[in-house]
Amino acid sequence: MKLRNLRIETQPQLMIIPMIDIIFFLLVFFMMSTLYMVEQHTIPVNLPQAASAQQDKPVSINITVLDSGNIMFNQEEIPLNLLAKRVSLELGKQTDNVFILRGDKQVAYGQVIAVLDELKQAGAHRVSVAVEKVR
């Protein structure tokens, strides 16, 4: 004769609905709390409007050396001997322009250096060289 064990033979049940509720609550909590983490160190003021207002953000200008050796100033093709004049015109409009030099990896190193030299001779002080990040 087999005696019955006094322990409960049923397995405990895992209730998934309350866990989903708690996870959703935590998600909403962290989303709302990150919105208030940004500190602004300014005094709120109602500023007047002006028609001649301008933004103090420097403009970035792309100068691309294609694999064929052609030079692109933003979207227009320009010869190397006119590059310094064009850069001077842009610096005359706004002096804190950022020039981004993008050279194809197939182009000769000397061609990119010639473009960089023209930029420096024209007075460009803020020049960046664009590269791709290694994965």
Image (spheres, helix red, strand yellow):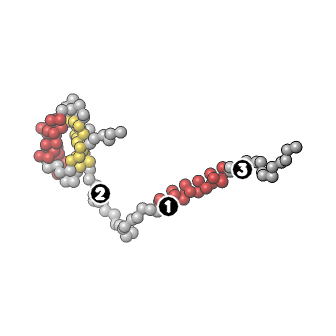
Q: Is residue 21 visible to us here?
A: yes
Question: Mark 2 to mark 1: distance in Å?
Answer: 31 Å
Query: Where does the image place residue 37, in percent across and percent down from the top left?
Result: 44, 62
Residue 84 position by quadrant: top left
User: Disc 2 to disc 3, how far (Cα)?
Assistant: 65 Å
Q: Are marks 3 and 1 in contact (CB under 8 Å)?
A: no
| Side of 125 where 5 appears, left or right | right
- The vertical placement of 67 against 55, above or below, is above
Q: Earlier in the sequence, mark 2 or mark 1?
A: 1
Amino acid beneath label 3 = Pro
Circle 2 sits on which residue? 55
Which residue is the site of mark 3?
Answer: 12
Instruction: Tell me the number on the disc at residue 33.
Output: 1
In this rendering, which labeled residue sits more in front, label 3 or label 1?
3
Residue 45 visible? The answer is no
If you read the primary sequence from the N terminus, does the residue marked by circle 3 or circle 1 appear first? 3
Q: Secondary structure at mark 2?
A: loop
Label 1 is placed on what type of residue? Ser
Q: Secondary structure at mark 1?
A: helix
> Which of labels 2 and 1 is toward the front?
1
| Residue pictured at 42% horizontal, 62% vertical | 38
- Disc nearer the start of the sequence (2/3): 3
- Residue type, numbered disc 2: Gln
Position in image of residue 123 (x %, y %) = 14, 49
Q: Residues within 10 Å of mark 3 (few under 14, many from 20)?
A: few
